[in-house]
């Protein structure tokens, strides 16, 4: 009896697994064609300077609308990474973002910050893809920032350092994303040339003393290495005032604006400035 019920549990378990695999294969098949079918778009979320409370850059965030439904990047980006599709998808985002940014013509020039996955970053073709995106769009390299998640620094240390140096040589700036969540050692950070450190929203939204301590420590480290700090996920005035009192340089979050398509960003800018 016990044996049978064990087998039953395993049976249910493997059915759930199979369902997950089917689901993933289904999504992957559609992800493969998403760009060609014009299901992908890039939205832009303002990043504000904490002093003047003016927009200084935007983060490019990929959106996928499939059969009338929005699929979250937190669901499909990992899939794109596992399947190798991230190279083509990431190249498309980079080109789209550079072209959009080069066409904005805002009164103050605004940088665009593009998320880059580790598989893209360490691919042999990445630097030439980057160079081509800049050439095609004529975007000034200093107006392009690349966001790299902190967790990737633990692996591929040599390859990452080489690529970051090549990116910097082009005049493109580097942000470390989700800082504080990736457990990278401080000595490793010292060898990575970065311009911005993005404090993860889990710290911004947590009101505990420990969270503040981590943010203060992050600020000290960032300053020591000559990096500016950006706080992600600011949703309320209270959070903004608190983060401001810590001396963070830039703010990003729903409190200011949600990610918007390029035409809506232009409207938003004209309404606010
Ligand atoms: P991320 O790079 O840390 O991006 C910030 C995420 O926080 C975005 O989620 C943004 O919409 C969200 N966010 C911004 N302000 C607030 C706020 O005030 N409250 C809350 N709750 N959330 C806020 P999104 O667009 O769903 O993207 C999720 C993640 O997917 C990104 O995290 C990034 O890791 C990845 N991702 C998005 N687009 C791309 C892309 O083009 N390439 C790559 N490789 N990854 C991407
Ligand atoms: Mg990011
Ligand atoms: Mg982030
Ligand atoms: Mg984050």
Image: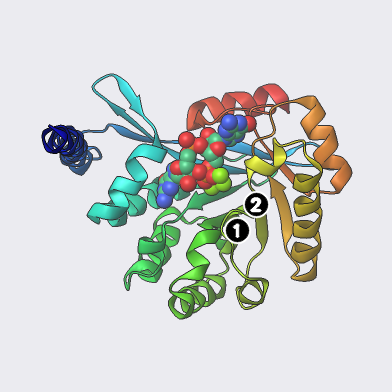
Tell me the quarter of the image containing the N terminus.
top left
Badge number at residue 215 = none
Q: Residue 67: where, in percent of width, then height?
A: 23, 22
Mark 1 vs 2, N-terminal side: 1
- From the viewer's side, name the closer residue of 155 and 132: 155
Residue tagged 1? 175
Residue at the image position 69 percent from the left and 35 percent from the top:
205
- The scheme the figure's colours follow is rainbow
Residue 121 in view: yes
Q: Residue at x 59, y 53 (%)?
A: 181
**Quarter of the image where one finds residue 47:** top right
Secondary structure under tag 2 reads: strand
Q: Which label sits on residue 198?
A: 2
Q: Depth check: give the residue in front, 106 or 19.
A: 19
**Residue contact between numbered discs 1 and 2, judged by CB atoms under 8 Å:** yes
Left or right of residue 74: residue 102: right
């Amino acid at each position: 009896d016990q044996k049978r019920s064990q087998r039953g549990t395993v049976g249910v378990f493997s059915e759930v697994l199979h369902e997950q695999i089917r689901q993933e294969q289904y999504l992957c098949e559609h992800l493969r064609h998403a760009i060609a079918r014009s299901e992908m778009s890039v939205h832009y979320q303002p990043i504000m300077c904490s002093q003047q409370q003016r927009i200084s850059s935007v983060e490019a965030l990929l959106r996928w609308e499939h059969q009338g439904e929005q699929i979250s990047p937190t669901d499909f980006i990992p899939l794109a990474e596992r399947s190798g599709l991230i190279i083509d998808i990431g190249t498309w985002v980079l080109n789209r973002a550079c072209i959009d940014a080069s066409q904005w013509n805002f009164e103050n020039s605004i940088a665009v910050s593009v998320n880059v996955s580790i598989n893209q970053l360490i691919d042999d073709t990445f630097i030439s893809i980057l160079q081509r995106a800049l050439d095609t769009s004529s975007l000034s390299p200093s107006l392009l920032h690349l966001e790299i998640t902190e967790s990737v620094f633990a692996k591929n240390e040599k390859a990452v350092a080489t690529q970051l140096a090549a990116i910097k040589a082009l005049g493109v700036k580097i942000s470390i994303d989700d800082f504080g969540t990736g457990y990278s050692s401080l000595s490793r950070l010292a060898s990575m040339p970065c311009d911005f450190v993005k404090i993860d929203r889990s710290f911004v939204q947590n009101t505990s003393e420990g969270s503040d301590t981590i943010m203060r420590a992050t600020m000290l480290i960032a300053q020591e290495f000559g990096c500016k700090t950006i706080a992600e996920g600011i949703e309320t005035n209270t959070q903004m005032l608190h983060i401001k009192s810590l001396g963070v340089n830039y703010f990003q979050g729903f409190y200011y604006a949600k990610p918007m398509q390029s035409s809506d960003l232009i409207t938003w800018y004209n309404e606010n400035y």
